[in-house]
Amino acid sequence: MLIKLLLIATVLVAGAIIFQTQLQTILPNTVSTIPDTIREDVDAITSRIEEQASDALDTITEEVLNTTANIIQP
């Protein structure tokens, strides 16, 4: 099911890219905001992933430092 949805989304995006000039004449306001909206969504997802990775790295680093400190100082 997921593959079918991805295929449909791919076809829609490809169609929007190919027929962008025709869509701009029909829907000038909507078409101009589509790339901006997609860019904003990708930026939001990227920043969320970076934040979660940074938090995970900080947690792991703290655990390693605490464990190492406990081993060195009995």
Image (cartoon, helix red, strand yellow):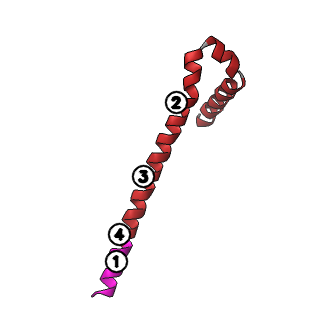
Tag 4 residue = 62
Q: In this view, does 72 lie above or below 33?
A: below
Q: Which mark is residue 37?
A: 2
> Where 42 falls versus 30 (above or below)?
below
Q: What residue type is labelled 1?
A: Thr
Q: What residue type is labelled 3?
A: Glu
Residue 2 image point, x, y percent: 58, 36
In three-dimensional space, the C-alpha distance between marks 1 and 4, rounded to whole angstroms, equals 8 Å
Amino acid tagged 2: Thr
Horizontal placement of 15 versus 35: left or right?
right
56 or 27, which is in the foreground?
Answer: 27
Identify the secondary structure beneath mark 4.
helix
C-alpha span from label 4 to label 3 = 16 Å
Residue that carries the numbered disc 3 in the rendered image? 51
Instruction: Determine whether label 4 and label 3 are within 8 Å by CB.
Output: no
Instruction: Classify mark 3: helix, strand or loop.
Output: helix
Q: What element carries label 1?
A: helix
Q: Does the magenta stretch include residue 69?
A: yes
Question: Which span of residues is magenta-colored?
Answer: 64-74
Is most of the magenta stretch helix, strand or loop? Answer: helix
Quadrant, the N terminus: top right
Q: Which of marks 3 and 2 is nearer the N terminus?
A: 2
In three-dimensional space, the C-alpha distance between marks 1 and 2, rounded to whole angstroms, equals: 45 Å
C-alpha distance separating marks 2 and 4: 37 Å
